[in-house]
Image (cartoon, grey):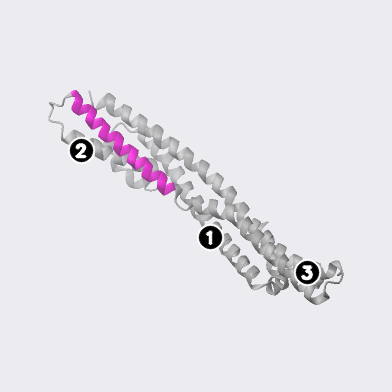
Amino acid sequence: MEDAIWVHLVTGVENGPGGKSTLDLLLDASGVVQGVLLLLILASIASWYVIGYKWFFLYRARRESEAFLEAFWASKRLDAVYQSLSAYKRSPISHVFKAGYVELTKLKSQDDGKQTMSGALGGLENVERALRRSTTAEITQLESLVPLLATIGSTAPFIGLFGTVWGIMNAFVKINELTGGDAVSIGVVAGPIAEALIATAIGLFAAIPAVVAYNTFVNKIKVLASEMDNFSADFLNIIKRHFLK
């Protein structure tokens, strides 16, 4: 559907206002309107790039996280899980595990067999902090570029509206100059008005996919963040049961 819209905008229709195609209307628009249209087209291109990149990024993160969790719960040794992390490089949950496991190995290496309860609790807090820091870093990575979609989605319609208002204002000025303030037919007004309204159309075309993608990605990131929190809690419980006795 989007391809059809772009084909229409580029090739135009021969039966438009005043017999002009859409492309003719774009070329005849004022410099300000053309600048607005160029900005909106660039915003749309950037939006689709981010949509494609983040969709693939989050898809891989989700798929590898599911595979990692399956391997983690099937394994009986944490060191074996740690050695297999290279297979889950795009999984944020595997990165959280790595941070916690590295901190745990430091804790175990310092254990001389005379560890006190306060020392054990302090070590557990270190592991918990490592898990929390890693989770925060992974969420930041997952959210990268996503705010750009929100920015495009919220501003593109208003940028298009600005182009429309500016175009309509110039259209009426030109009409007044041509007619000297006399009454004009709809055919004279239709062409300049159509030139201006194209800006709003392109603004909406840039904004709608960006908003839909933004909401979709935010939901996916929330799910992954929740899974990281749940994994951190489970990992801490495992440490309490088996390592800090």
Q: Residue at x 62, y 52 (%)?
A: 208
Q: Secondary structure at mark 3?
A: helix
N-term-proximal mark, 1 vs 3: 1
Q: Quadrant of residue 98?
A: top left
On whether residue 138 falls in the magenta region, the answer is yes
Tag 1: amino acid: Ala
Tag 3: amino acid: Gly
Q: CA distance from mark 1 to mark 3?
A: 30 Å
* Eye-nearest disc, 1 or 3: 3
Query: Is 142 left, or right, of 36 in this rendering?
Result: left
Q: Quadrant of residue 139?
A: top left
Return the x and y of residue 189 as percentages of the image width and height: 80, 68
Q: CA distance from mark 1 to mark 2?
A: 44 Å
Let me know if residue 7 appears in the view.
no
User: Closest to the observer: 57 or 116?
Assistant: 116
Q: Which residues are magenta?
A: 117-142
Residue bearing the label numbered 1? 46
* Eye-nearest disc, 3 or 2: 3
Q: Residue at x 68, y 65 (%)?
A: 166
Q: Residues within 10 Å of mark 2 (few under 14, many from 20)?
A: few
